[in-house]
Amino acid sequence: MSNLEDLVIPLEEIMLATGNFSEENQILKQGDCVIYRGQLSEGWKNCMAAFRHYRGDGDEEREAFQNELNYISSLKHDNIIPFIGYCDEGIGNMVIVHEYPVNGSLYDHLKNEDKRNSLTWAQRLSICLGVAKGLRYLHSGVSEHGRIIHLSVMESNILLDNLNARICGFDFSASIPVDEPDQQVYRPVTHIQTYMDPVYAATGLVKAASDVFSFGVLLFKMLTNMHALDLPGESTPADLIELVQRQYDSGLDKFIDPAIKDQVGGRSFRMFNKIAYKCISLNLKDRPTMVGIVQTFEEIIDINDQGDAPLEDFFIPLKEIISATCNFSKAFWIGGGGFGEVYKGRLPERWKNREAAIKRLDKTGHQGKTEFRNELDLISMFHHQNIIPFIGYCDEGTSFYIDPIYHESGVLCKESDVYSFGVVLFEMVSGILAYKRRSFDDGKPQPLIHLVRRYYNKELGKLVDPCISDQIKGRSLRKLADTAYRCLSFSTEERPSMSKIIKSIENALDIQEFGDASITTMRIHQYRKLEDLLIPLEEIILATCGFSKASEIGNGGIGVVYKGQFSERWQNHDVAIKRLNKTGDKGKTEFLNELKLISKFHHQNIIPFIDFAKQQQTKLYTSAAGTNCYTDPIYHEGSILRPESDVYSFGVVMFELLSGMLGWYLRKIGDDKPRPLINLVRRYYDYEKELLIDPQIKDEIDSSSFLAFIEVAYQCISFNSKERPSMETIIDKIEEALDFQVANGEDSELYRGQLSENWDNRSAAFKRFYNYYWSNTKEKFLNELKVISMLDHENIIPFLGYCDEGKETIIVYEYPVHGSLANYLEEDDKRSCLTWQNRMEICMDAAKGLNYLHSGLGQHNTVIHGSFMERNILLDDNLKAKICGFEISEFIPGNQPCQQVYKPVDEHIDTYTHKDPIYLETGFLTAESDIYSFGVLLFRILTWPEALTRVSKDGDGIPNSLTMMVQHHCHNRLDSLIDPVIRDQIGSPSFRMIEEITRKCLSYSIKDRPTMDTLVKTIKAALDIYVHHDGGVLAKDNQRIGYYFTLCS
């Protein structure tokens, strides 16, 4: 402190400079620290200064003052505010004095409209660079304190000296020793601020990445000048960073500060956006360092200063490069490698006759294109004395066909092909290859798509190849061009599907060929193509021996089906020949309709179409036939054909396979009279469904498999078409019936089965751990065995035993008949059976189970589950929830002072969605980690199945916006995400309670998350209110809600 003694400034001097700390000289208030400006006397060279006055008398104020003094007095850098002196004359008289530049703070400039409007985009970039350099200096570790983490990077702590940024405000800063970079440093968070890193706010763990997050917030404020934004259709403003997370993919252009909107754009803007978005990633590993940020901003400023020309302006035609290299002559070759060859050459006058190195890539295919575009994007951004200057590029190849959205995001989808097809369509119309350049009206030569976007709306005719311009009909051109242009939309949602494109092109072709001809004329033209498939009646009579009985293989109301063999002209095909017996217009209509459809089908599971015959009123073609017993009764009554009609017919086939009985045969069961198959099904399904099983396979069928199969088959033949499952669901159910395996996990697979008499013939679940070389499954097996064997609670799955023989490690516990909650939530038919009350009761059971783990083991012992999710919640025959899956759980004795355990995240697992993001970042598992996972469960219980899949993922596959999305929707109500199955059942009071507690469970702040005991009470309260609401007792709801919400606070 000896050096600091020379820098003491008497309180009297400070009072004089600030006018006795007058409000007139007050700049800003930050908690108990008030900042004033004033001018010191001659002893301090009459300099303008800022006075940080710590007025409080508590330990926090003394610590903040001492912290600021220790750091600011030791720092010297162009982007750190210079320290002048200090005053410490007792309580209420602690003051830090540093320079106060004439331009004031960045906060003043952004808050004041006139000042903000005067800040150009170039000046804002320069300020950002200055702040980045200051933070780089702090993080570098060159000071005596080691690496300093500021922890309060915001506008009010950035002062502007002739717009050169200088950082101040080190009240809450912390340091990490240079020689111990991995040391864990904690600084508890007292107040959550908008600029604060949510990971730091939740954990108190000090990292340089926290400053990077705050810097990212600052960048977006510089771009938008907004803390919150009003969005259409939403009742309250959205937080800026929440909005950026939600809107980044669709573009932030509309949120740019109007004062700089005309100055922002091009590559510098894209680079700015990209680096800013990385800064606010919730995955610390994705955030760049301040060293990298400084380098990026230097490049951004260089590009911006040079006019930010579009990449297309650097295009060099291939003919110029061929000329410069004498057609890539060996004499001009200067090097080569796996990437390609490098040549030297002199470019013509347009490129200032510069000597150039020309790199010719020899890679083809998608990888080659990607590497070319990647290098082009990077090298065109660099502007540095030690990086070779970029002159231009040539790409007279396929890159012009690549979807720009795919190029930017790396996400390939079917709409990317649609874009490429749109380019091809315009090539066909214009006669110009996409990579060739052409000019209209003596303008600058441009690639085809640039010309399309320029001339499409006003002068479409200029895009037509002169060779065909006299042949094209206007309406046909417009139809084709409209379709092609929609293919090129920058919004994938606006691009048409290929089926719609085909229809549009066919329409354009019809218009071109027939002009104003009727649709009927065009259809006749279309049917005329089928004449090539006509089979003479004589050939069919020969193949069927004159439609003999011996050749008949089936019949029904729609006709008779025969087998036969055609002659060599038809490659001696064995065929099925359907002879329709209907006459008149109806018969003809059905014949033409089926002919049109079957002739279009090409699939391995659809009978191949060969040909048809049409002679002497006989309508026949090769296909299988059916009878009335397969016909959907709804279609039979109303003549309305829907996909559900096929589902009905498929259900009949499923019962045929189960019973060994054809649909139209009659069979009697017991003393009952003979009935057709479906009549038997409807008679015996509810009470004696086992009687429907073919005796030949009865002993082979597993009861669970049988129930899964017959249940979906019966749904297929429902008289209510809405109750019939989709074919996708039917396939899933049949696969389920085929598979005795219940579920797969990251480290195990779960089977169901029945133990022998020694274990009372109990139904059991067998959890078999994998034997992967990279997975510590043995350790997880032993861990689960240790934990589950000590637990005894009605909402914890009962443990039966285990097996540990050689490589086989198996945990055995009871298997409730309804399986896991995951199955119920993921399958539409099962989910529809879960009422709102069922769901709350399941959540109640699960909460009781977790509460037992956290606080019900006595002597303050705790078990942290660590993997709480739907597949680890099993449901018994009364839908009572029981928790399982303890392979990564941790037992913490009550005498252990720290109620958390360091457990690194297994990099091989893929079920991140349910895991606490604070645990994912820090590796510290706490009881609050289970609370977060319970919040995910509540969210899944409330919402429709696809709601959770909307969560975006970062590069490591870790969802980074579930909490943000839920916080936003809970703030604006989760109504839009409610599962439609329960929408009409939900009582508003109980729903709002569950909605609120869900938001608290998913908070980034551990302190805001409720305990399991509070969750049990809250869910019980919501359930109680719901039951009373249904019974009509509403008188005291408001009082109850007010009371129960106090439990959560």
Image (cartoon, helix red, strand yellow):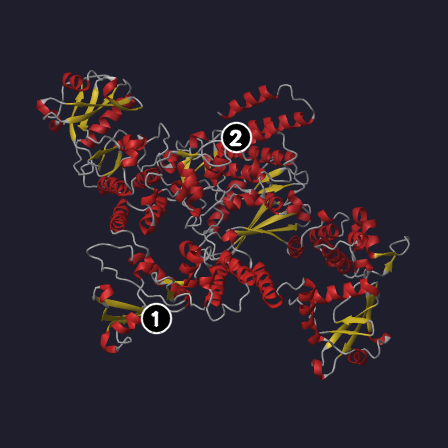
Q: Answer whether labels 2 and 1 touch (C-beta < 8 Å).
A: no
Q: Where on the picture, by quarter, is residue 75?
A: top left
Q: Residue furthest bottom?
A: 568
Of callouts 2 and 1, the N-terminal one: 1
- SS class, disc 2: helix
| Cα gap from disc 2 to disc 1, whole angstroms | 59 Å
Residue of label 2: 996
- Image x and y of residue 80, in percent: 20, 36
Q: Is residue 773 above or below residue 44?
A: below
- Image x and y of residue 1039, in percent: 58, 19
Residue 124 visible in rendering = yes
- Image x and y of residue 922, in percent: 38, 41
Residue 905 visible in rendering = no
- Depth check, front residue: 805 or 475: 475
Callout 2 crowding tier (Cα within 10 Å): few <14, some 14–19, many ≥20: some
- SS class, disc 1: loop
Residue of label 1: 362
Q: Quadrant of the N terminus?
A: top left
- Depth check, front residue: 631 or 343: 343
Residue type at mark 1: give it: Asp
